[in-house]
Image: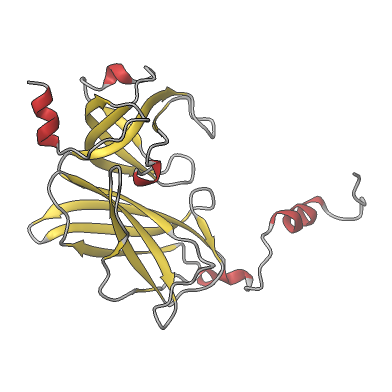
Amino acid sequence: MRFPHTIPFFILWLALTTPFSTASAENYYNVDGRLIGSVESDGMHLQIEFDAHPWGGVVWTTTPAGIDVYRNAIGDGCGLWERITDEPVVWSWVPDLGGTGIAFELVDDATQPGHGYIYQARAVDAERNIILEDEYVHLGVATNGVALLAHGTLYGGPGGCGLSYVQEISPCGNDSHCYPPLVFQTAVDVAPYVNSEAVLLLYGVVVNVISPCGANETVALLSGAIPVACAVAVEERTWGSVKSLYR
């Protein structure tokens, strides 16, 4: 198909690639979540940011009044998402004034030692109703000590967007929705499993968030692994029970 040469290429490309919406242009938000957790005496302190990353997040076309944050436990048979915000966090991102996101801190006082948690955010209106057309935003992962983080295989090698080497966890199909997307670093005991195709329960702690290709990625330091096939239903185990297997 040939296009008339009188249409500038950039304008034609923009028309073909811009999502259709009745919202005005200044109401587009390329929302990518970023979260770092630290355990203190009063609970898990969560440093949360919303970044303007077009490759790593979702597009919100309706400006929210606020944000509610939810938590779920990592592990096979994960439970229901639980809201942890007493009141919505007021939305203050104004993109047409040059804003590129918002940042805030929450304290989650209900985490347990030896467990990991996934956090997500939902946009809400002034009556605290979820804005359905604005998809949920994956914020990140936090660990209270060494915890179960993944069930899958370990890959090390070339990655997307021109990266020469990445270390990623490929989840298996068994309750994969209960495990977060992660990249990893390894301790000595876990390193031999990289590219071995062994399916593992993987334990460790979250240590960082990186943005190598314009998308936030959670980095886990893996310190323990137990071979468990995807087809086998597994019972969530604490790090103490895992250590007892090595004795």
Q: Position of residue 100 (x, y in %)?
A: 46, 62
Report the number of discs.
0
In this rendered view, identify the residue nearer to me: 198 or 216.
198
Residue 92 vs 179, above or below: the answer is: below
In this rendered view, identify the residue nearer to me: 3 or 96.
3
Q: Is residue 110 left or right of residue 27?
A: left
Residue occupying image coordinates x 87% and y 55%: 7
In this rendered view, identify the residue nearer to me: 86 or 243.
243
Q: Can you say which quadrant of the picture contains the N terminus? A: top right
Residue 173 vs 72, above or below: the answer is: above
Residue 200 vs 45, above or below: the answer is: above
Q: Is residue 242 left or right of residue 232?
A: left
Q: Is residue 238 left or right of residue 55?
A: left
Q: Can you say which quadrant of the picture contains the C terminus? A: top left
Q: Position of residue 64 (x, y in %)?
A: 46, 74
Residue occupying image coordinates x 53% and y 30%: 162
Residue occupying image coordinates x 8% and y 27%: 244
